[in-house]
Image: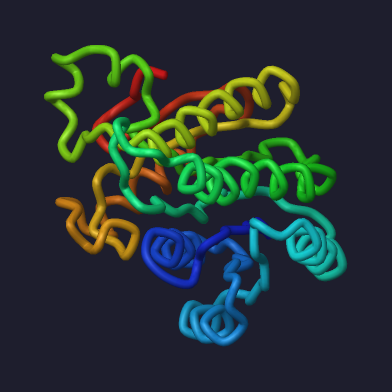
Amino acid sequence: MTITVITGANKGLGYETARRLIERGHTVYAGARDVARGEQAAADLGARPLLIDVTDEASVRAAAQTVRAEAGHVDLLVNNAGITGRLTTPAEPEADVMRRVYETNVFGAVRTIHAFLPMLSKPGAAVVNVSSGLGSITVAADPTLRASVPGWAPFPAYASSKAALNMLTVLYAQTFPNLAFRAVDPGYTATDLNGHRGYRTVEEGARAIIEAVLDERATGSQFAGADGDLPW
């Protein structure tokens, strides 16, 4: 039995990722920070509901304890929960916006990884961090590459939070060589995160996540995109 935990799984990419993994036989804990929405999504999916607010240390630890008591281990952790915050430009004051975005996109992932790390001990266990092409420093620094990325825009809070998440992916992979760490960019997907302005469907975006999840490499890190690997 493959035990999978997905944060932010009550809608959008998290929901679709959960649905596809359940189809493949995974036992999925569908994480949500709202009890009612989480339970409804889990019931619709055939998943196990998991109350988890990644911005709250106590909530994350309680969620990990729940999974430990019920399943005993985790094979796959998908850090999907994320926010854009108010999309400011580099010229605007944005310390408060950045603090809020980092609380979910960076610190939330860190809390969740460390809470579940003791359970991710089986061979082949993996952590997949849902990132963004906006977090690629190589792309941001190259005008030619920027022009080739649909939806690219200079949003410092969101983009830098995903760059930080990418760096953490690499560092965790080096620190825990027996555990696979991967970052994945699902592409500019139409979800609540961007007011459904993305050009990819949720089904198309989730495909990139599923491909990263099912990668056969048991160790190492990578930054996978919907159209192939991306530069860090």
- Residue in view at x 29 percent, y 32 percent: 91
Q: Nearer the viewer, residue 169 or 58?
A: 58
* The quarter of the displayed image where residue 170 is located: top right
- The answer to which image quadrant residue 47 occupies is bottom right
Q: Image point 71% across, 60% down: which residue?
A: 56
4 lies above or below 122: below
Question: Looking at the rendering, in which quadrant would you find the C terminus?
Answer: top left
Left or right: 100 in relation to 65: left
User: In the displayed structure, would residue 204 be above or below residue 135?
Assistant: below
* Image x and y of residue 215, in percent: 48, 35
Q: Quadrant of the N terminus?
A: bottom right
Q: From this view, report whether residue 175 is shown above or below residue 33.
A: above
Q: Position of residue 107 (x, y in %)?
A: 64, 43
Q: Camera-side residue: 86 or 94?
A: 94
Judged left or right of residue 57, residue 126 is: left
Give the x, y percent position of residue 89: 28, 37
Q: At x 17% / y 15%, what residue is drawn?
A: 143
Nearer-the-camera pick, 198 or 87: 87
Residue 100: x, y in percent?
Answer: 53, 51
